[in-house]
Amino acid sequence: VTSKFIGGLAKTRDAFGKVGELFLRRKKIDEAFFEELEEILIGADVGVNTVMALIDELRAEVKKRKIEEASELQPILSEKLVEMLRGSGEDAGLRSNPNGITVILFVGVNGVGKTTTIGKLAWRYKQQGKNVLLAAGDTFRAGAIEQLEVWGQRVGVDVIKQHSGSDPAAVMFDAVQAAKQRNVDVLICDTAGRLQNKVNLMEELSKIHRVIQREIPGAPHETLLVLDATTGQNALSQAKLFGEKSGVTGLVLTKLDGTAKGGIVIAIRNELELPVKFVGLGEKMDDLQEFDADQFVHALFA
Ligand code: GDP
């Protein structure tokens, strides 16, 4: 797992490498040291609020433990980052339904990697021997249904769809019925990602929630918000926008392989009470990695 993170996070690791350099170059902990650390972390997209919080905690540790050498602070920084990323300690794994069909809903704006992530997750479940079905709930974006079907074929799972423009809640109803008939273990649902009309989108999502819940009590078991890490601070604003309002239970950060902005994971985790469930480290089927705070931080400084 660590090697996956180390490879996938190459560019972000360059950004965090400067932290390691700083700890070596500046022997003494003084104001200049903290200022430089602050600058590097903000530059690595950790986000101003989160960096301030981190620096405050480090200052407190320096006082409490009477630390003088900069090098002693490096493991403490790692510890704090792991704590932040773990949050209240939710399991990285996804909730499932022990008594029947597990329903996982995906939300997120267009282009973030939602369809790709659905395909990757379907493949993961198939690898575990599960019977998987996909629901083409993005009836709004041209090509969204076809794109999901391409992934369905690639992975070898069926897609339940209606025509473009139809009511997504009706697609979900069909999909749940099909899942019941076909003895499906996991139903993964795509939804529209337009943000131009936020109110409509939120209404649409809550209608989808209601339909699914009525058919399968306790469902959806997860509502995952997909965010594109390459957009840095924009991903953070999107996360806040969707936030808890749309019933989001977890996050997926995609495209970490192509960006130096991986620090955004820390900012998002710190500012939102939502666990990061997966990260995307490439475009292939097996490039979806379960998030692990320890491994992630270890990879940043390895
Ligand atoms: P959607 O509009 O949210 O459904 O986005 P797509 O799933 O179509 O993805 C948009 C683009 O991002 C595609 O070219 C994907 O191959 C690419 N993509 C998705 N996830 C990742 C990832 O983790 N890493 C990289 N490098 N590319 C990704």
Image (cartoon, helix red, strand yellow):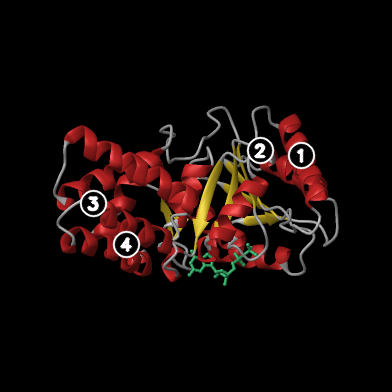
Dot in front, 1 or 3: 3
Mark 3 residue type: Asp
Q: Nearer the viewer, mark 2 or mark 3?
A: 3
**Mark 1 within 8 Å of ligand 1, using the beta carbon:** no
Tell me the residue that label 2 is attached to. Answer: 247
State the residue position of label 1: 206
Say the numbered circle drawn on residue 30: 3
Q: Position of residue 233 (x, y in %)?
A: 54, 59
Tell me, yes or no, whether the two marked residues, 1 and 2, touch with CB atoms within 8 Å. yes
What is the spatial separation of the Cα atoms under label 1 and label 3, in whole angstroms? 51 Å
| Mark 4 neighbour class, 10 Å CA radius: few under 14, some 14 to 19, many 20 or more | many
Tell me the residue that label 4 is attached to.
16
Q: Answer left or right for 277 relative to 5.
A: right
Q: Amino acid at mark 4?
A: Phe
**SS for callout 2:** loop
- Within 10 Å of disc 2 (Cα), the crowding (few <14, some 14-19, many 20+) is some
Report how far apart the C-alphas of labels 2 and 4 lie in the structure.
33 Å
Kindly identify the residue that appears in the image at 59 percent across and 56 percent down. 157
- Note whether residue 128 is visible: no
Q: Earlier in the sequence, mark 1 or mark 3?
A: 3
